[in-house]
Image (spheres, grey):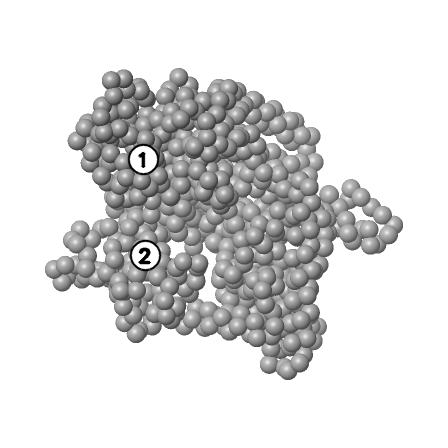
Amino acid sequence: MISWFKYPFIRLLIPFAIGIYLAFALENMANDAKIILRLLILLSLLLLSQVLTSSLLKDYRYRRIFSSLLYLYLIVLGFTLVKIKEYKLCINDISSVDLCPKYYYAILVEPPIVKEKSIKVMMKVFGIEDDKGYNHDVNAKVVSYFEINDKSLSLRYGDCIVFMTNPEQVEKPPNPEQFDYKDYLYKKGVTHQVYLKSDAWLDIAYNDSNPIYRFSYWLRDFLLETMQKLGVQGEEYSVAAAILLGYDDSLPQELRQKYVAAGAMHILCVSGLHVGVIFMVFSYMLAFLDNRKKWQYVMKNCVLFVLIWFYALIAGLAPSILRATIMLSFVIVGNMINRKGVLLNSLAASAFILLCVNPANLFDVGFQLSYVAVIGIVVLQVPISKVIYSKYKIVNKIWEITSVTIAAQIATAPFTIYYFHQFPIYFWLSNLFMTPISSVVIMGGMIMLLIFFVPYVNVAVAWIVSKMIYVMNFGVSWIESLPYSIIKGLYVNDIQFVVLLITLLLLLLLIECKDIKMLLSIMIMSCIFLIVNVDINLKRNKQKEMVIYSINNMTAIDFINGGEHLILSDSIFINDKSAFSYNIENFLVKKGLYHAGKNKLLHEDFDENFVKKRKNVVTFDEKLIGLSDGSVFSREELSYKIPLDYMLIYGRKRQTLSYLLNVYNFDYLIIDGSVPYYLTSRLIDEADALGIKYHNIREDGAFLMK
C-alpha cells in the first residue's frame, strides 16, 4: 500500500482541483455578489468546523471526519476562488459601462509582437470617458492589433495610450470543433479585442511599467540583439531565442511543425530541462562554497535561488518553467534546513501554488503536459530502464536516455491524442540525440550570453552554439521526413480521455504498490474504452450531414455519408492548407473522416454514390441544393421553376434574389462567407422583404444540415 502521509500536497491538490473544475463546469451559474458572499460564508463555516473537530475529536478513530471536512473545505475553496475571479472580471468588464464611450485609456502590459500584418499586444484598459464627459474606472484586458507603421513600432511595454475605437467581444468559433479562441482568452481574463488604425489612437508619452518586468523585458531584448550581433542568424537564431530565453515569436511555423513531428517540441519550450541545466551549471561554478562554513553553504543556496527565479523571470514566467522553478526552490530550501523532500510531493506543492495564483492553469495544455511528463518520468523511468541491461556502459547510457523519453511519452500520450489528435512515432530517436545536444546548447548559450563582452571568444562560442543548433534542426528535419513520422487523425472523446487517465493512474499505482488488483482494473478500463469506441464507430457509420463552413473569402461545402465525405470548394481553399487545418481538420477528425475524403471544384460536375452535381444543383440525401455565384439568372419568370430545398449564394458578383426566384423556387437562403459585406446586407434586406428565411454564414457561423 502507498503511504499517503509522505504526499500531503497530493491529498490537498486533488480536492482543490476538483473544486476548480466544478466551478468552470458550472460556469452558467450567475456570478453575483450574493453567490460569492454565500460561498465565503460556507467556506468560513467549514474552516471553523475543521478547527472545532481537530480540537474536540482528538481520538484517532475520528480522523476520517476531519479528513472529510478538510476535503470538502478544499473543494469549496477551489470553487470560490474561481467564482471570485470571474466576479471581478464581470464587474470590471468594458461592457459594464452603459453610456456611449468616447475615449479609452489603456496601458500596454506586455511587449508588442510584430506580426505579418499588424502589431499584437495585450493592453489593460483602466479608464473610459463617455460622451457626456464622465470618467469610469475599469480594469479590463483587451487584445489589441495596431496597424504597422513607425508610430506603432515605437510602442514599448508600459506605454500609456488613448484610443477611440470601441473594443468588440471576441467571437465564438464559427465552425464545429474549431479552436475556441474566445474560451481560451476568457480563461486568461480577456473578453474583448480591438484593431487600431494609426489615426485611432494617441501616445500620451507616459510609461507606467513595473520596474521588475521592465528590466526583464529590456534584458531579454538586449540578449536577443546580442545573439544577432554575435552572428547567430536565421533559423538558428529563432531556435536559440526559444531555447535560451523562451522567445518563440520569431520561430517559423514550418520549423515548429518539424519539431512537433519529431516529438521534440518540448526542447523549444523553456521548462524543467532548461532550469535544471542552469541549476547544475551554477551549482558547479559555486562548488567552492561546499563543505565550508554554514553561512557559505547558505549563501550558495541563496544565490542559486535568486538565479533560477531571475532566469524564470526572463523566460516569461510560463507555467512549465514556474513548475520547475518552484520545485527547485523547495529543494534549495530543503538543503538549507537539512530536510530532503519527496519529489512528487514537491511537484504537487508547486501545482497547488500555481492554481492558487491562477485557477485557469488547470485547463492550460502546457501546464497539464509539463506535470504529467514529470510524473511519468519519476514513476515509470526506473522500471522501464530495468527492462534492458547490457555489460557495455554506452548501451546502458543510451537506454537510460531512451527510457526517460518513453516514460514521458507514455504519460503524455492521452493528452497528445486528446488535444492534438496526433502521435509522433520517432520520439525516442529524436530525443536520443536531441537531449544531450540541447543540454550543450543551453550551457553554451548561457556562456555565450555571459561573456558577450569578451572579444573573439564570444564570437567563437556563438559560432559553436549556432552550429549545434544547425545539427538539431537538420536532425528534426530528417526525422520528420521519415515515413510515418507522425500519425494524424487520432481521436478520443471525453469519456475515452477520462478512461485513459484512470488507466494511466492505475498503471502508476500498479508500479508503485505492485497490487495485482490494479492489473484487473486496467483490464476493465480497457474493455470500457473498447465499448465506447465501438459505439463511436456505429454512430459514424450512420452519420449523414451537409456542412457549409465559415471561411473568410472562401467557399467549402462538405457532404458526409457514413465513413466517407466529399468537399466541394473553390480553388483558393484547395491550395490553402492552413485554412483547412485551422477551420476544418478537428471536425473531420471527430467524424473519423480525416483519411477518407475527396475534393471537387465548384464548377465541376460529378456523380458519386451519395452526392451528385449537375450545373448549379447538388443532390444529397433527397435534398436539392442550388449554387449561385451570379453567373446564372433570368430577368423574366420561367414557366417552370426548379424546386430547391436550399439556395447557397457565394462569390463576389452582385446577385438579386428576385432574378434567382425567376428560375428557382426555394424557401431557405444561405449566404456564404465569400460574399462581401455590402452584398450580404443587400441580400438580407431583400430576403426580409420577400419573407425568405436565411442563414448568414459570416455572422451565424457554419451551416449544418443533418
Residue sticking out furthest to the right: 391
Residue 195 circle label: 2
Closest to the observer: 150 or 121?
150
Closest to the observer: 259 or 272?
259
Q: Would residue 176 be visible to someone looking at this image?
A: no
Which of label 2 and label 1 is nearer to you?
Answer: 1
Closest to the observer: 98 or 577?
577
Asked if the residue at tag 1 contacts the one at tag 2, i.e. Cβ–Cβ closer than 8 Å, the answer is no
Q: Kindly state the secondary structure of the residue where label 2 is placed.
A: strand
Q: In this view, does 516 lie to the left or right of 362?
A: right
Residue 300 quadrant: bottom right
Q: In which quarter of the image is the C terminus?
A: top left
Q: Where is residue 690 in the image (x, y as percent from the top left)?
A: 18, 28
Residue at the spot of label 1: 630
Q: Would you place residue 557 above or below residue 134 in this image?
A: above
**Few, some or many residues within 10 Å of mark 2 (<14, 14–19, 20+):** some
